[in-house]
Image: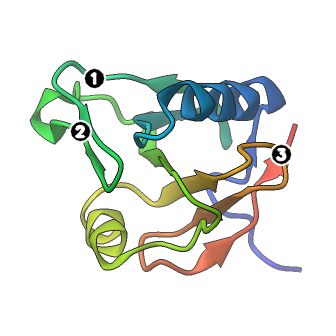
Amino acid sequence: MSKRRSVWGIEGDVLDMINEASRQSFPNEFVAALRAEEGIITEILLFPGSISNERSASMQLHMLPIDFSVVGTVHSHPGPSNQPSDEDLHLFSNFGNTHIITCLPYDRRSWQSYDREGARITLEIV
């Protein structure tokens, strides 16, 4: 029996909200932090001072509250690839252990989750 990751799922409504925010931000990227409870991502957190354009998005990580339920990040790519860039991998390795990238067409089939090393992980939609 394999050990379950500490974050193993995402609420469907949260995933839909991520994709809607990504559609609304297009052609700019969307960025937020992820909050999980009992292994399930239940919320996204938006931060003042977040900056996005057609090529990148960044959060002011120093604005994060001390909150151990924050488990990683989510952002969108304005094209058809949800593969992490070198910059994404750098962020993954420095913050959190669960990261999501969604891409066009921003639906339940266009996202992928990654661990802090950039390896693909599976999150169950609950």
| Neighbour tally class for label 2: few under 14, some 14-19, many 20 plus, Cα within 10 Å | some
- CB-based contact (under 8 Å), mark 2 and mark 3: no
Location of the C terminus by quadrant is top right
The residue carrying mark 1 is: 47
Q: Is residue 113 above or below residue 87?
A: above
Pointer 1 or 3: first along the chain: 1
- CB-based contact (under 8 Å), mark 1 and mark 2: yes
- Kind of residue sitting beneath label 2: Met
Label 2 to label 3, Cα distance in Å?
Answer: 24 Å
Q: Could you say whether the residue bearing mark 3 is in a helix, strand or loop?
A: loop
Please give the label number shown on residue 108.
Answer: 3
Residue drawn at x 52%, y 69% as measured from the top left: 115
How far across and how far down the image is residue 56, in percent?
30, 53
- CB-based contact (under 8 Å), mark 1 and mark 3: no
- Kind of residue sitting beneath label 3: Arg
Please give the label number shown on residue 59.
Answer: 2
| Neighbour tally class for label 3: few under 14, some 14-19, many 20 plus, Cα within 10 Å | few
In the foreground, 80 or 96? 80
Is residue 43 rendered to the left or right of residue 65? right
Label 1 to label 3, Cα distance in Å?
Answer: 24 Å
- Kind of residue sitting beneath label 1: Phe
- Asked whether the viewer can see residue 75, the reply is yes
How far across and how far down the image is residue 61, in percent?
18, 40
How far across and how far down the image is residue 10, in percent?
73, 40
The single residue placed furthest to the left in the displayed view is: 62
Residue drawn at x 38%, y 55% as measured from the top left: 96
Label 1 to label 2, Cα distance in Å?
Answer: 7 Å
Residue drawn at x 31%, y 79% as measured from the top left: 86
Q: Nearer the viewer, mark 1 or mark 3?
A: 3
Is residue 96 rendered to the left or right of residue 8? left
Q: Could you say whether the residue bearing mark 2 is in a helix, strand or loop?
A: loop
- Asked whether the viewer can see residue 38, the reply is no
